[in-house]
Amino acid sequence: MIATLQKENEIYTARYERQLHHSSEEVWAMLTDNDKLQQWFTELEVVDLRKDGLIKFDMQDGTFIDMKILDYEPLKILAFEWDKDIARFELYPSSGGCQLIFIETLSSFTEQTIKDLAGWHVCLDVVQALLDGQTVASRDESWKTWYVSYKELLNGLIK
């Protein structure tokens, strides 16, 4: 399901929701355990898992970007800087698993915004597939498909 775009007080958010048939503990490990994190987002590394802690983004050119953890509640909330935006994961236990909500707070709309939204969509699909013991055939092909969808969603907002 495509993310929903919301506007409140001049701030936009993209909200993704996934109902997963896995415990909050299993999903949390996918978000915070570096071995599991590497399976779906190879550029991210949790360095200091706490509020005001640190996540590093590997630019794949020998440089890294430090991203401060803005909000943290074990097994429930992980939010961190994402350039000028905020990436926020929320977990809610539910019958038969948990609900994963991912919210990106958007400071502006650029071509990179479309790429990021499609990328987050594919990442969440990969997390779900990995938890289910499956693989995603082609992340690139999936990304290309979602890129078109997110470009349509943001039509008229890109500057």
Image: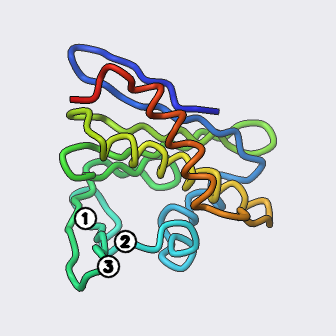
Query: 21 and 126: which one is in front?
Result: 126
- Residue 54, image x and y in percent? 26, 67
Q: Are marks 1 and 2 in contact (CB under 8 Å)?
A: yes
Q: Are marks 3 and 2 in contact (CB under 8 Å)?
A: no
Kind of residue indicated by mark 1: Gly
- Picture residue at 22% right of the left edge, 59% below the top: 68
Give the Cα separation between the discs numbered 3 and 1: 22 Å
- Picture residue at 53% right of the left edge, 38% below the top: 101
Query: 131 and 125: which one is in front?
Result: 125
Give the Cα separation between the discs numbered 3 and 2: 16 Å
Judging from the image, what secondary structure is the residue with disc 1 in? loop
Q: Which residue is mark 2?
A: 46
First in residue order: circle 3 vs circle 2: 2
Q: Is residue 42 left or right of residue 108?
A: right
Q: Which residue is mark 3?
A: 60
Q: Is residue 28 left or right of residue 109?
A: right
Kind of residue indicated by mark 2: Val
Residue 4 vs 58, above or below: the answer is above
Kind of residue indicated by mark 3: Gln
- Residue 79, image x and y in percent? 35, 49
